Amino acid sequence: MIAVNSPGQRRIDEIGDESRRRILDAAEELFAERGFDRTSFVDIAKRSGISRGSIPWHFKNKDGLVMAVVERVVGRIWPAERYESVPSLTEVFAETAELLRSGNSALVFMILVEALSDRGVVHEQYREFFARRREGIEVLLRLRRPATADPEKAAEQERTAAVTLNGALLGIHLQALVDPENVDLDAALVSIATMFDRNLADVWR
């Protein structure tokens, strides 16, 4: 019997972690290429080099694997601690540009398509993804709130502005993904940042 924390046990754990990582890497690539429904455990096993039987051992079933992929992608783009400090508007836009230029861009919208279906596990993860983005923008706006604004009304106005700004950023994201030759990402982000800054006071009117 292998003792807990022994070199042998640690090696087994390392092998398990490596297998899990390879399965997630393969699943992420295939989900982005083919979608969730058209990707099987057999496909993932071939791409990862890990036996098909090991996949349910790590993730139980396909929903478990999908959730693990979504959690990893969202966590990599916007980790939970991201909004422990308040981001500037420039940082929010810079993060959007970074996402657009990353290999995760297509998968983020693939996840969105799945979130619109009845797949509860993906829907909940993506709901949390949107909520985190909106909350970060709301905090940013709250710090710029005029001293004379009614707190309750201002909170509603800030929530609406956060939804609007988040939607605009995601819309730019989608256009750049679909038609990159005709969408100047940097110019679009500068344009929306300029419009938002110039009309910031309108948020509380």
Image (spheres, rainbow, N blue to C red):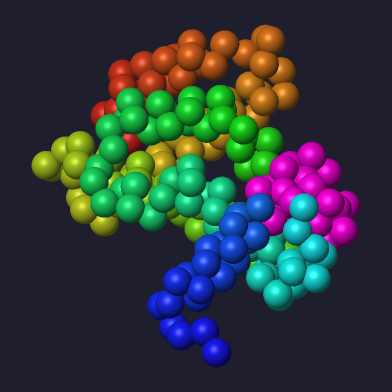
In this rendered view, identify the residue nearer to me: 44 or 68: 44
* Residue bounds of the magenta highlight: 23-48
Task: Tell me if 49 is positioned left or right of 74 in this view.
Answer: right
> Main SS of the magenta segment?
helix
Whether residue 57 is visible to the viewer of this picture, yes or no, is yes
Does the segment drawn in magenta span residue 36? yes
Whether residue 116 is visible to the viewer of this picture, yes or no, is no
Residue in the picture at 41% in, 28% down: 93
- Which residue is most to the left? 147
Does the segment drawn in magenta span residue 189? no
Picture coordinates of residue 65 (x, y %)?
A: 69, 63
Residue 51: quadrant of the picture: bottom right
Picture coordinates of residue 145 (x, y %)?
A: 20, 40
Residue in the picture at 69% in, 10% down: 181
In this rendered view, identify the residue nearer to me: 205 or 111: 111
Task: Tell me if 95 is positioned left or right of 176 in this view.
Answer: left
Vertical placement of residue 177 versus 84, above or below: above
Task: Tell me if 191 is positioned left or right of 112 in this view.
Answer: left
- Which residue is most to the bottom? 1
Quarter placement of the N terminus: bottom right
Vertical placement of residue 197 versus 115, above or below: above
Vertical placement of residue 173 versus 133, above or below: above
Vertical placement of residue 37 versus 59, above or below: above
Picture coordinates of residue 38 (x, y %)?
A: 88, 52
Residue in the picture at 38% in, 33% down: 92
Residue in the picture at 52% in, 32% down: 99
Quarter placement of the C terminus: top left
In this rendered view, identify the residue nearer to me: 118 or 42: 42
In this rendered view, identify the residue nearer to me: 20 or 157: 20
Picture coordinates of residue 29 (x, y %)?
A: 72, 43
